[in-house]
Amino acid sequence: NGVISDGVVRNQDDERSQRLFMRHIAGDLTVMLLASDRRKDDPVAPYNQAFGMPGANIQDRWIVLGTQYSRELSDSTRWQAQLDLIDYRYVGNYAYDDPYTVINRDISTGQSIVLGSRIVTTWPRHTMAAGFEAQLDRAVEQRNFDVEPYINYLESKHDISSLGFFVSDEF
């Protein structure tokens, strides 16, 4: 069932993307919306796929809704807080020809909530910053399976959280 190729792929290399960016500022508050949807047909055979095999493609999509509050505390000090809501999805279809055409599918999805705050003080030729960031990734899912005949290789779903503090001093 092998694909015969002269080393040239025709009508299988395509990429389409759509992006959106919106921002609204009202006083000390900024609201932002970012979105991207990309689809790519991929004939070059990554991950040991058969070269030129139809059906190999990826799609990744993400959306971020963010808010930031920024306030000047003095002439040299500014405080910022932010909240971001993130949604991500990736689907990869990989075409194999061994001994018949099999589509192997990767799926990764997740939703995140990111909360952060920082205070920045500047002097001539000197900047000092301190803050934190907390991130909660809910329902982070990874799956890998052959579509037909269905064979499941990976099914993982977790909630992940992290908290970080930082201090920076630049001269």
Image (spheres, helix red, strand yellow):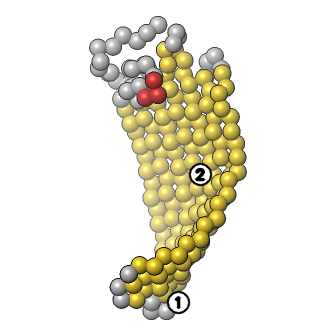
Residue drawn at x 38%, y 81% is 171
Q: Amino acid at mark 1?
A: Leu
Q: Earlier in the sequence, mark 2 or mark 1?
A: 1
Residue drawn at x 49%, y 14% is 97
Which residue does the numbered mark 2 point to in the structure image?
87
Residue drawn at x 59%, y 51% is 87
Which residue does the numbered mark 1 point to in the structure image?
73
* Along the line of sight, the residue nearer the viewer: 37 or 151: 151
Q: Amino acid at mark 2?
A: Asp
Q: Is residue 125 above or below residue 116?
A: below
The answer to whether one can see residue 14 in this image is yes
Q: Residues within 10 Å of mark 1 (few under 14, many from 20)?
A: few
Q: Hey, which residue is sitting farthest bottom in the picture?
A: 74
Q: Position of residue 152 (x, y in %)?
A: 67, 26
* Along the line of sight, the residue nearer the viewer: 44 or 90: 44
Q: Is residue 135 above or below residue 18?
A: below
Residue depth check, mark 2 versus mark 1: number of the one nearer the observer: 1
Q: Residues within 10 Å of mark 2 (few under 14, many from 20)?
A: some
Which disc is residue 35 wearing? none
